[in-house]
């Protein structure tokens, strides 16, 4: 048999000769290889989440009008937290949390994505916890972390540009004024974190979303499982949480892995639905999954998904690993790669699901479009495919 | 010895050995054998193989240390990798004590180099249709007749693992066995085939009344297909792993081509380079993950087909981008000029999508044996339906 391994190694042989010809310098010290398998505990966490969503949530609920309200999503979040203690999982143990890593968070995000279980996981654990935990000397940050762990406080984070500024005058409590045009997870959230300048320095502030001076308006949304709101602040009382520093970039790395893992779950579910249908639907006297045109489409979906899974695990590992262990790997690049690929995959795979289903896949009654919506909308969260590519270009190909 | 200590010793060995033996041309199989012998004598070969078979006897995770460390060096063992990663492990998994004693340490030392005598003129994608026959002889041996084709490395291999029909009356897959063939026995004729690249790396192998001695059967009679699929999964995962350094044109090579072409700052070029980088990382990490699963014995080994398909795709995309960057400098060049390597890469690409099973067959494997979709009806095996459920992603 013409052996593909042989061909690869033949190529390696050629490139080996080539490298040796240039120079034989000491290679960089080898980093620990990324841990790409789940531990038994992480697997069990995934199973527990899977069971919980099956028992407590029906994705078809998203087909009804109106979409789940902020109160409903908050109740779902508390229910999830009550059963499995999810809200505090990545909160540091000093603040009453479980101190879990991004690897565990990704396991949870994947399962919630599979189920399209509406939650403020992204805002609360993807963004707020890493932002708050970056400075645990600050008592107000610790208080918020403790509330997340203890009560399942839901938090939204306005991470993109905004025109919010400190309201002039007033010497006591700071107050903020301005408009946040689009904040994800804001309808169910009780607290909002945002960055505004304080004496020229980017500063993290917390605002109570149910408090005075805050007007929140729910937006129509492509994704029926995530809430988006416009938030107007008019001298809204705020708590200063100190300079934000690099923490926002690190939090965004974590958040990207959360979205990527969510999309991994979405894609995995889309493949399962496609395979289920292809294994039952009979045309021309045969189950359609026996035709290579359909079978190969499903196999290509699988290939994309398994690559996504590997990138997500690698990015999570990079974010959890010490700088020494992760060697030359840049967690920022790893998170960008994971989300770029996960979004590309999810958009493709959810469209493939609709194609395999045929006409029924284009109906409102079939839940396929809910996954397609989620995929398309999530790829535009935390930037876009183009902005992620540009960010990677800046680090891979410095001008 | 801990895995870290092993990694440090290995680095030291590689630095020392390669400083003494650096070559500028493509290494020969004999250079590979010499390197492997040096590694063996330093006690560093086969990190996770049991000590009784010449290995270092370390935990299975040490293989990962080996892969990570060696990836950074131009090690000349390409011709031996099929032996070390697929054929040797098959003898370890399915062989009897006598076979293990005879072959394992010798394989690890680079003395026994292997090939796979599998494809035939009439059995390519439909490999289980092989017609080469082996009949038992009174002395407990076998009499082999048939012809093999596309056999990589047969021209230098010492031994071959022969997939052949030992029970013509049994059903297609169950009449097959795996035999160990000494490639120097009378009746074995190896004839090189010239590839489309112009090089000769694979062969036709004629087996004319080859008499194999007793003890040549690997595993049980009728177990041939099971051993074949076991070896195939290992091979495909190893291919995914090979990506890291064995790309025909690595990402770094393509970036270097971009810089050389003076076009590295064009937005469209940067865009394609970044996407290629992401796809290469995805292929590489899938291979790494499946190899970790293989070490631990978890997951579905048939996912190796996915690693192989993406590997071939990334290799093709790398070559395509390099041609786009260089334009006609990639298609005509002076003898010995660097730009000529791009044409070599272009010519290799189609082989990757065929070797070890075509992309199309890999997609069938994934669809039927990983996703559990039904097979196409086949005239020789009506109505058999794959019952394997999904095993993907559970580890």
Image: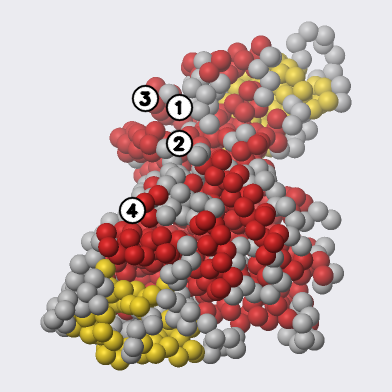
**A209 vs A325, nearest the viewer:** A325
Residue sitting at x 70%, y 32%: A248
**C-alpha distance separating marks 3 and 1:** 8 Å
Query: How far from the left and from the top, in percent, is residue A149?
Result: 51, 19
- Tell me the chain of label 1: A
Closer to the chain start, of discs 2 and 1, is 1
Side of A98 relative to A242 (left or right): left
Residue sitting at x 39%, y 87%: B205
Residue A41: quarter of image = top left
As drawn, the residue found furthest toward the top would be A172
Query: How far from the left and from the top, in percent, is residue A134?
Result: 67, 24
**C-alpha distance separating marks 2 and 1:** 8 Å
Residue tagged by mark 2?
A108
Residue B27: quarter of image = bottom right
Residue tagged by mark 3?
A83
Residue sitting at x 63%, y 55%: B14
Q: Residue A23, can we see it?
A: yes
Query: How far from the left and from the top, in percent, is residue A265?
Result: 45, 47
**C-alpha distance separating marks 1 and 4:** 27 Å
Task: Say which element carries label 3.
Answer: helix
Side of B115 relative to B268 (left or right): left
**A181 vs A33, nearest the viewer:** A33
- Tell me the chain of label 3: A
Side of A48 relative to A394 (left or right): left
Say whether marks 2 and 1 touch (CB < 8 Å).
Answer: yes
């Amino acid at each position: 048999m013409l052996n593909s391994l042989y061909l690869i190694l033949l190529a390696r042989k050629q490139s080996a000769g080539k490298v040796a010809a240039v120079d034989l310098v000491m290679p960089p010290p080898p980093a620990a290889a990324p841990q790409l398998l789940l531990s038994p505990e992480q697997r069990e966490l995934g199973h527990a989440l899977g069971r919980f969503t099956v028992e407590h949530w029906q994705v078809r609920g998203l087909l009804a009008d109106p979409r789940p309200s902020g109160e409903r999503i908050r109740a779902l979040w508390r229910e999830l937290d009550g059963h499995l203690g999810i809200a505090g999982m990545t909160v540091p143990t000093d603040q009453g949390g479980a101190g879990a890593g991004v690897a565990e968070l990704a396991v949870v995000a994947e399962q919630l994505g599979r189920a399209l279980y509406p939650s403020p996981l992204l805002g609360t654990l993807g963004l707020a916890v890493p932002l708050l935990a970056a400075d645990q000397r600050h008592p107000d940050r610790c208080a918020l972390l403790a509330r997340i762990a203890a009560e399942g406080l839901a938090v939204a984070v306005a991470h993109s540009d905004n025109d919010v500024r400190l309201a002039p005058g007033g010497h006591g409590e700071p107050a903020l004024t301005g408009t946040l045009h689009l904040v994800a997870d804001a309808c169910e959230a009780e607290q909002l974190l945002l960055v505004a300048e304080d004496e020229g320095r980017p500063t993290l502030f917390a605002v109570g979303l149910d408090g005075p001076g805050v007007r929140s308006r729910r937006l129509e949304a492509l994704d029926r499982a995530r809430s988006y709101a416009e938030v107007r602040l008019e001298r809204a009382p705020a708590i200063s949480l100190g300079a934000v520093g690099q923490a926002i970039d690190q939090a965004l790395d974590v958040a990207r892995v959360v979205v990527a893992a969510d999309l991994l779950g979405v894609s995995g579910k889309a493949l399962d639905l496609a395979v289920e249908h292809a294994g039952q639907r009979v045309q021309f006297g045969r189950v359609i999954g026996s035709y290579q045109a359909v079978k190969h489409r499903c196999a290509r979906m699988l290939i994309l998904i398994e690559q996504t899974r590997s990138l997500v695990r690698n990015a999570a590992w990079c974010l959890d690993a010490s700088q020494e262990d992760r060697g030359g790997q840049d967690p920022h690049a790893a998170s960008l790669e994971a989300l770029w690929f996960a979004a590309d995959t999810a958009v493709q795979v959810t469209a493939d699901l609709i194609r395999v289903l045929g006409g029924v896949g284009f109906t409102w009654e079939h839940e396929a479009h809910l996954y397609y919506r989620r995929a398309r909308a999530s790829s535009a969260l935390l930037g876009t495919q183009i902005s992620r590519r540009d960010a990677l270009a800046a680090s891979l190909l410095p001008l | 010895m801990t895995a870290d200590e092993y990694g440090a010793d290995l680095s030291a060995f590689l630095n020392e050995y390669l400083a003494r033996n650096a070559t500028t041309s493509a290494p020969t199989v004999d250079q590979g054998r010499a390197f492997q012998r040096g590694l063996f004598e330093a006690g560093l070969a086969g990190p996770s193989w049991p000590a009784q078979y010449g290995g270092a006897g370390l935990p299975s995770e040490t293989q990962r240390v080996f892969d990570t460390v060696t990836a950074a060096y131009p090690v000349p063992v390409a011709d031996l990798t099929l032996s070390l990663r697929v054929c040797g492990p098959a003898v370890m998994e399915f062989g009897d004590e006598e076979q293990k004693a005879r072959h394992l340490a010798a394989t690890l030392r680079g003395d026994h180099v292997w090939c796979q005598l599998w494809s035939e003129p009439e059995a390519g994608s439909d490999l289980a249709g092989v017609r080469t026959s082996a009949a038992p002889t009174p002395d407990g041996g076998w009499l082999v007749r048939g012809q093999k084709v596309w056999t990589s490395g047969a021209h230098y291999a010492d031994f071959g693992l022969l997939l052949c029909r030992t029970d013509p009356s049994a059903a297609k897959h169950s009449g097959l066995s795996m035999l160990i063939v000494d490639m120097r026995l009378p009746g074995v004729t190896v004839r090189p085939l010239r590839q489309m690249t112009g090089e000769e790396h694979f062969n036709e192998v004629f087996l004319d009344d080859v008499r194999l001695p007793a003890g040549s059967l690997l595993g049980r009679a009728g177990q041939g297909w099971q051993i074949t699929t076991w070896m195939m999964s290992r091979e495909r995962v190893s291919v995914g792993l090979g990506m890291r350094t064995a790309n025909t044109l690595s990402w770094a090579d393509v970036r270097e081509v971009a810089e050389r072409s003076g076009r590295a700052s064009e937005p469209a070029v940067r865009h394609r380079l970044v996407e290629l980088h992401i796809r290469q990382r995805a292929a590489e990490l899938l291979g790494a993950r499946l190899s970790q699963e293989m070490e631990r014995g978890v997951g579905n080994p048939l996912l190796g087909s996915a690693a192989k398909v993406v590997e071939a795709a990334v290799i093709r995309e790398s070559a395509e981008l390099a041609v786009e960057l260089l334009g006609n400098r990639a298609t005509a060049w002076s003898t010995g000029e660097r730009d000529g390597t791009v044409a070599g890469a272009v010519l290799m690409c189609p082989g990757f999508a065929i070797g070890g099973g075509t992309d199309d067959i890999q997609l069938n494997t994934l669809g039927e044996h990983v996703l559990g979709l039904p097979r196409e009806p086949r005239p020789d095996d009506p109505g058999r339906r794959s019952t394997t459920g999904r095993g993907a992603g559970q580890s």
